[in-house]
Structures are given as C-alpha cells and as structure tokens.
Amino acid sequence: MVTGCSKFKSVILKVVDPKSPESCKTLHEADIVVGNPADLDRHLQSMTRVKWMHSTWAGVELLVKHPPPSFLVTRTGGIYGQMMAEYVIAQIINRERDLFGMYEHQKEIVWSSSVYQRKGYRPLSSLSIGILGIGDIGHRIAEVCNTLGMTVWGVSRTQVPEEVRVPYIHHYRLTENLAEVMESVDYICSVLPSTPSTRGLLDGDILKMCAKKKAVLINVGRGSLLSDKTIIEAIRKGWISGAILDVFEVEPLPPDSELWKMPEVIVTPHSSALAYTTEVTNCKLQLEMI
C-alpha cells in the first residue's frame, strides 16, 4: 500500500504494511492512499484526512459495502482486459486441444497420435462465446476472441446504443435475454462484478438453458455469480459440459469442495489477472465516486 504521491515533490511517498500497528497512524495522516481494497477495508472509516483513495482492483465490492466515504475513490481500469483475455483464450485452447490429456500421455511415454486423430478438435473459428459484462474487460476478451475467429455475444444490463456498438461483438443482448444466449454459445464467460443485481444471477436452473450445446462456463468475474452447488448440479445433470473457475463464492476454495476433484472442472486461484506495480501506476484512472 502506498500513501502520498511521488509525482509532486511536496508530497512524501510512504509504503506501508496495512497489517502493522504503525500503518493506522500513517493512514490517518495520509492525504492520498493507493492500495488493495482487501487491505484497506478495515481502515476505510478511520482515514479521516484522506482526500483521494485509489483501488488497485477493478472491482469495488469491498468498498461499496461501507457507508459512502467523504473522499474521492477511484479504481484501476484499462489494464486487466488483456490479461484476462489471454487467460480465457488459453483455457479454451487447452480444452479444445486436450493439452492436459496430451501431457498425461507424455508422462506415460505414450505416442497418442491415433487417439487425437480419431477425436479431432474444434477450431476456434467454429466456436461461439457469450460474455456476461461488456465493460473494458469484456470488450478486450470479445476483441481477442473475434480476432481468432470466434462468434461473440455480449450481454449487458442496459441497452448499448447503436452508435457505440463495436464490430467484434456480433450479437448484443440484455441480461433478460440470457436464455437465448445460453442456448446459442459454446462458452459462457462471466466478467461480472459482485453487485446486488449480479449476486446469484446464475443460481437456480438457468444453466439448464445451456443443455442444447452443453456450453462450458468460464468465471473470471466474481464467485458470487452462482454457488458451487449450482455448478456441480449443472455438470452432473449434463446442462454444461464443464467449468473453468478462477473465482469462487468462498476463497480460498475449501479443501473439501467437490470442485477440486471433478474432472470437468479447472480450478485456478483467482489469478487470471494480477495487479503489477508498473501497470497500476501507468493505468487509465476510472473515477468512481463511492
């Protein structure tokens, strides 16, 4: 966590450990704070002198649960889209080409050419993806998927005006049209934040709409979108053919979660996009008054 601002010579820059006893005093004296919301959460209401706080996360759910602060709050935007797009494409290619299976054959010293010639694979140009949430992150994922030949569906809460629509999102739909999207795509990718309108959005039996194409669920947004129970049930009932999960309703994912051992599931530890110092300091600020 950084307090102050190095751009101005009159401001002292300090790096503090938010868990140390000394950090409270430093935060109380700071005018500007840059940090991780998980670290700042317990200090938020006591930072009485702060005029501006910048979050190194794209999400703001830990901040909006508190009463509105008296200072300006901004979040980091414009840097996570590329990293998340790379994650999504890597996972799709890995699944379609069964690279994990090939690695298992390598460990067993098996030349598996005949196996993969018989199975074949689907080229990206034959696949479609529905992206839930088409802000800056969703747009970058859409752009990369389109570049590689995929058909892209973009889902938003409100109507996107014709004049700002982009050519790499081929079909625009509202959240209320989720059923149509799920029936039409091979992959459902959520980049949605955790808000009252998105929590539990995919709970219940809505994933049943994926059964026609047995889509794969990718979640790089927030785990509150749906419960582990919902994912497990959807896989067991054959509604979806698998899930690629970077976020969960409880993190870290408990050791006794069934998701760990399900062969249809890929578990990654909330690492699809990391906040690197150089990228955060060079980012485009997106102002969010909280």
Image (cartoon, rainbow, N blue to C red):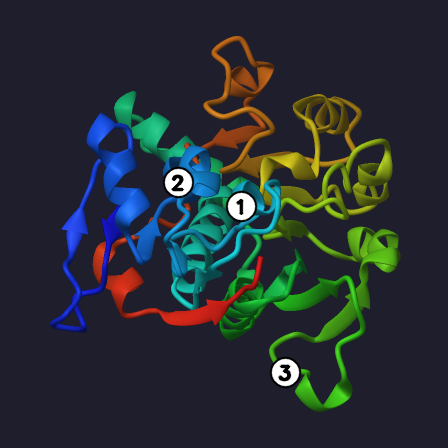
| Mark 2 and mark 1: Cα distance apart in space | 9 Å
Can residue 215 be seen here? The reply is yes
| Rendered view: 282 above or below 204 | below
Lateral position of residue 187 relative to residue 197, left or right:
left
Disc 2 residue type? Leu
Say which label, 3 or 2, has the lower sequence index: 2
| Mark 1 and mark 3: Cα distance apart in space | 31 Å
Residue 284: x percent and y percent? 39, 73
Say few, some or many: other residues with alpha carbon within 10 Å of mark 1 (under 14 / 14 to 19 / 20 or more): some
Q: Secondary structure at mark 1?
A: helix
Residue denoted by label 2 = 40
Lateral position of residue 112 relative to residue 187, left or right:
left
- Image disc number at residue 274: none
Closer to the observer: label 1 or label 3? Answer: 1
| Mark 3 and mark 2: Cα distance apart in space | 37 Å
| Rendered view: 5 above or below 277 | below
Residue occupying image coordinates x 35% and y 26%? 104
Q: Are marks 2 and 1 in contact (CB under 8 Å)?
A: yes
Q: Are marks 1 and 3 in contact (CB under 8 Å)?
A: no
| Rendered view: 147 above or below 110 | below
Say which label, 2 or 1, has the lower sequence index: 2
Can residue 98 be seen here? The reply is no
Q: Secondary structure at mark 3?
A: loop
- Image disc number at residue 63: 1
| Rendered view: 264 above or below 39 | above
The quadrant of the picture occupied by the C terminus is: bottom right
Residue denoted by label 3 = 166
Residue 240: x percent and y percent? 72, 36
Say which label, 1 or 3, has the lower sequence index: 1
